[in-house]
Amino acid sequence: MFAPEKKTRKPRAKKADKKAEPVLITTLQIGDAEFDISDIAAKAYKAYKSTHKRKVVTEFRVYVKPEENAAYYTVNGEGSADFKIDL
């Protein structure tokens, strides 16, 4: 006697995660200069956290001043002369 042939299923293709957000990129162009806003914000936050490791951040704002080739930031509503990065 012959054993019945087992049917094998093909694995289903994975569906895209419906909750995944798209990648957002914001670029500021002024004259011949081009600035990636997301990158500037990430660099500013990294600069802050490198010197304030234990501080809890609830609000982080970045102000880009292309005419000064710099970005300034505030943390939890407070600013400082040290809260500056060069672009």
Image (cartoon, rainbow, N blue to C red):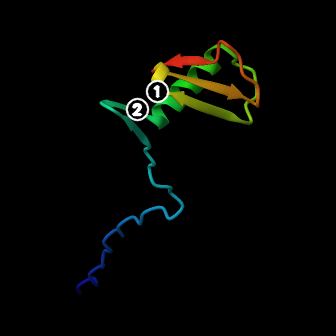
Quadrant the C terminus occupies: top left
Residue position marked by numbered label 2 in the rendering:
35
Q: Nearer the viewer, residue 13 or 8?
A: 13
Mark 1 near mark 2, Cβ–Cβ under 8 Å? yes
The number of discs equals 2
Looking at this view, name the residue that lies furthest to the bottom.
Answer: 1
Left or right? Give the position of 71 relative to 8.
right
Marks 1, 2: nearer the viewer: 1
The residue tagged with tag 2: helix, strand or loop?
Answer: strand
Distance from Cα at disc 1 to Cα at disc 2 = 8 Å
Q: Is residue 29 above or below residue 67?
A: below
Residue at the spot 30% in from the left edge and 79% down from the top edge: 7
Question: The disc labelled 2 sits on which kind of residue?
Answer: Phe
Question: Whole-percent x and y of residue 43?
Answer: 51, 25
Left or right? Give the position of 70 relative to 83.
left
Q: Is residue 24 above or below residue 33?
A: below
Q: Label 2 neighbourhood size at 10 Å, few (<14), some (14-19), many (20+)?
A: some
Residue at the spot 30% in from the left edge and 78% down from the top edge: 6
Q: Nearer the viewer, residue 69 or 77?
A: 69
Give me the disc on residue 66: 1
